[in-house]
Image: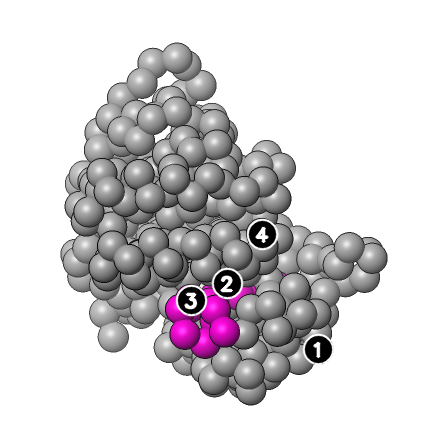
């Protein structure tokens, strides 16, 4: 996974990593926004992949604003070489460079334009925090109206976000979505049922994300490699270690649990399936950690009812 910002990531750093890690099957470019980089960079990458006969899918997570303004720059790349996921969330936090709020009408216009010019319906991601939590059902209903799916992720303690959105509140939202009969339109709701059944699945419930054969890696513009973009934001160096409890001590990601007694809880795989989530909970102190456990345990009967359907 490559986290790209306004600075170009030297192509040789990407290709060198791919040579050293032949198991890579997917490259996801996120940001910032991938469309801030000239498409020529991606054509060089595609050319190298074809020349070396690499069976690797390339995808973007982008707000598509530059595509909306200059579709001719991206149309060929999107049609034949790169798959795209986009993002949208209600509220007043997402704004254009002019300061204008990015509205549902704008999003729908871009969504329909993409479908007409590229040929398929976009999936989209939303990030839930305290300010926009009340829009969760509206977000999934929008996905249903558009004939696609969305993924609502909780805000992590990363970048400019200093306080993570509590995972137990996010869990309550996912259960609300399932109970409203909208679970098929929100991808995390589908993953939750797999995790509850004891199956390994994808981020943000991939308990093996530290494993080179099952996880993801994030390459930042300086070429440094981390476990995921959120951990890259924390400026954590190295793939297999994590800072714990704000100390300088490091322990392997595979050894991190919210609590040692988690192994006896029915929520074990759900709560302990994201290393960054665990680190965020630890960083907020004992009271925050205990609140997490109390609320998650209280939801077990509801989870048993909804996730076993």
Position in image of residue 250 (x %, y %): 31, 18
Residue indicated by mark 4: 37
Q: Secondary structure at mark 4?
A: loop
Residue indicated by mark 2: 125
Q: Secondary structure at mark 2?
A: strand
Boundaries of the magenta span: 76-90
Give me the disc on residue 269: none
What's the distance in space between the residues labelled 3 and 2, CA to CA?
18 Å
Disc nearer the start of the sequence (3/1): 3
What's the distance in space between the residues labelled 2 and 1, CA to CA?
17 Å
What's the distance in space between the residues labelled 3 and 4, CA to CA?
14 Å
In-front residue for pair 216/271: 216
Protein image colouring: one colour
What's the distance in space between the residues labelled 3 and 1, CA to CA?
25 Å
Residue at the far top in the pictured view: 248
Residue 66 vs 79, above or below: the answer is: above
Q: Name the residue at 31% across, 31% down.
A: 239
In-front residue for pair 190/226: 226
Q: Tell me if residue 218 can be seen.
A: no
In-front residue for pair 55/33: 55
Disc nearer the start of the sequence (1/4): 4
Disc nearer the start of the sequence (4/2): 4
Residue indicated by mark 3: 82
Residue indicated by mark 1: 105
């Amino acid at each position: 996974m490559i986290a790209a910002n306004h600075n170009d990531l030297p192509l040789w750093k990407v290709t060198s990593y791919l040579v050293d890690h032949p198991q890579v099957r997917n490259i996801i470019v996120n940001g910032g926004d991938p469309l801030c980089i000239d498409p020529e960079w991606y054509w060089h990458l595609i050319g190298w992949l074809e020349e070396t006969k690499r069976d690797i899918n390339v995808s973007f997570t982008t707000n598509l604003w530059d595509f909306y303004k200059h579709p001719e720059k991206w149309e060929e790349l999107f049609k034949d070489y790169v798959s795209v996921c986009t993002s949208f969330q209600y509220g007043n936090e997402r704004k254009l460079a002019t300061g204008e709020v990015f509205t549902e009408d704008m999003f729908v216009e871009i969504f329909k334009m993409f479908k007409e010019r590229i040929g398929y319906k976009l999936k989209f991601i939303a990030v839930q925090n305290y300010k926009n939590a009340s829009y969760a059902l509206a977000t999934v209903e929008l996905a249903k109206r558009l004939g696609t799916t969305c993924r609502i992720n909780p805000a992590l303690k990363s970048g400019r976000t200093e306080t993570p959105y509590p995972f137990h509140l996010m869990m309550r939202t996912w259960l609300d979505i399932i109970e409203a009969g909208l679970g098929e339109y929100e991808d995390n709701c589908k993953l939750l049922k797999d995790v509850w059944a004891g199956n390994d699945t994808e981020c943000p419930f991939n308990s093996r994300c530290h494993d080179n054969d099952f996880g993801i890696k994030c390459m930042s513009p300086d070429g440094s490699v981390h476990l995921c973009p959120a951990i890259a934001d924390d400026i954590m160096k190295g793939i297999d270690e994590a800072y714990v409890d704000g100390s300088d001590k490091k322990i392997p990601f595979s050894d991190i649990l919210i609590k040692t007694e988690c192994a006896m809880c029915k929520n074990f795989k759900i709560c302990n399936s994201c290393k960054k989530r665990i680190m965020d909970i630890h960083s907020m102190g004992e009271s925050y950690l205990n609140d997490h456990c109390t609320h998650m345990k209280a939801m077990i009967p509801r989870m048993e009812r909804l996730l076993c359907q």
